Amino acid sequence: MTALIMLVVIGLAVLVLTGIVIGVVDSAQRRAWRRIAAERRVSWEQRRQPRGPRRYHVDAWADEDTD
């Protein structure tokens, strides 16, 4: 019975330590991930900008949308 209790306690301790390690590593990498996300956002916004003359496309489902 004591061995079973020790196994549960050790298992919980491993889970807690794993959570702490993951939290520390994640917080250390947060700045790098935010920088990467910002670079990707700028790249995406540049791809979304229209090139050439502006063309408007109306895709209306109802008559009141085309007035």
Image (cartoon, rainbow, N blue to C red):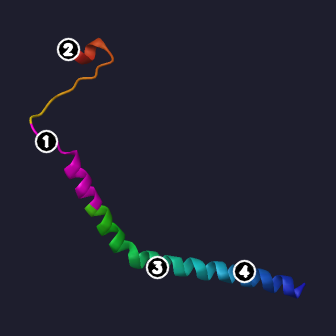
Earlier in the chain: of badge 3 and badge 1, it is 3
Instruction: Give the residue at mark 3.
Output: 25
18 to the left or right of 63: right
Instruction: Give the residue at mark 4.
Output: 11
Q: Position of residue 42 (x, y in %)?
A: 23, 57
**Res 2 → quadrant:** bottom right
Please identify the dominant SS of the magenta region.
Answer: helix
Query: Residue flagged by tag 3: what amino acid is it?
Result: Val
Q: Residues within 10 Å of mark 3 (few under 14, many from 20)?
A: few
Instruction: Give the residue at mark 1.
Output: 51
Residue drawn at (50%, 76%) of the image: 23
Instruction: Give the residue at mark 2.
Output: 67
Q: Position of residue 67 (x, y in %)?
A: 20, 14
Q: CA distance from mark 3 to mark 1?
A: 42 Å
Query: Residue flagged by tag 1: what amino acid is it?
Result: Arg
Q: CA distance from mark 2 to mark 3?
A: 57 Å
**Res 6 → quadrant:** bottom right
